[in-house]
Image (cartoon, rainbow, N blue to C red):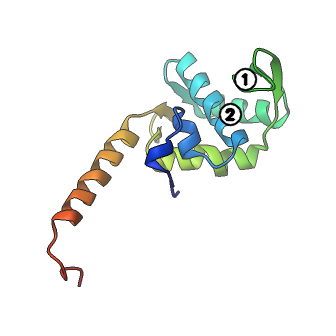
Amino acid sequence: MVILFDRFNLPKDIFEIIFATKQQKIVAKLLVNEMKEKGGELGKTEMSLFATKLHEGNLITEIEEEPYKGKKVKISYNKRQFYDRILTPMKGMGIIEYDLYKKTYKLSDAFNKELIRIGIMWLRELRKKPGSYL
C-alpha cells in the first residue's frame, strides 16, 4: 500500500492519511473501534461476523461527519472488499497483526515502528555522498 501525504496539509485523522475514500475510512474506524471494545483483539470468527454484519448492512453507528453528524446510520460494505481493501492493508502496514496460533487479530504498534524505520532510512539516504547510488 502506498501512503501519499502533504506534510503541510496533514489531516488530524490518521485514517484520512491511510485510506483513499471516506467509506474506507469509516469502515476502518469502525473496525478499530470494535477491536478496542473487545480489548484490542478479535477472533477469526468475530472478525467474520463483523464483516458479515457490514456486508448485510446490519451495522448501525453514529458518524462524526456532516451530513450524518449525530444521526444513527446503517453502514454497508462488501465483505470481500472489506478483507481486500481494509483488513489486508491494515495487516500489511502493521496496524493489525494476525496471530496464527491463537487465530486472533490484534491492534498493534508495529505501524509506528515501521514509520520510524522509514524515517531512519531517509536519514541514511540524506547522508550518502553524491554518486553513491550505483
**Going 81% across and 26% down the picture, which residue do you hit?**
67
- Residue farthest front in this picture: 8
**Going 49% across and 23% down the picture, which residue do you hit?**
40
Q: Quadrant of residue 72?
A: top right
- Helix, strand or loop at label 2? It is helix
Label 1 sits on residue: 63
Q: Is residue 101 left or right of residue 43?
A: left
Marks 2 and 1, Cα distance to the nearest angstrom?
8 Å
* Amino acid on which the number 2 mark rests in the picture: Ile
**Going 14% across and 74% down the picture, which residue do you hit?**
129
* Amino acid on which the number 1 mark rests in the picture: Ile
Label 2 sits on residue: 26
How busy is the neighbourhood of tag 1: few (under 14 within 10 Å), some, or many (20 plus)? some
- Image coordinates of residue 80 in percent, x first then y, are 74, 49
The image quadrant where one finds the C terminus is bottom left
- Helix, strand or loop at label 1? It is loop
- Image coordinates of residue 46 in percent, x first then y, are 64, 28
Q: Is residue 60 left or right of residue 118?
A: right
Question: Which disc number belongs to residue 128?
Answer: none
Q: Is residue 75 left or right of residue 21?
A: right
Residues under numbered marks 2 and 1 in contact, where contact means CB atoms less than 8 Å apart: yes
Circle nearer the N terminus (2, 1): 2
- Image coordinates of residue 109 in percent, x first then y, are 38, 35
Q: Is residue 103 left or right of residue 121?
A: right
Q: In the image, is residue 6 above or below residue 110?
A: below
In the foreground, 26 or 13? 13
**Going 78% across and 30% down the picture, which residue do you hit?**
53
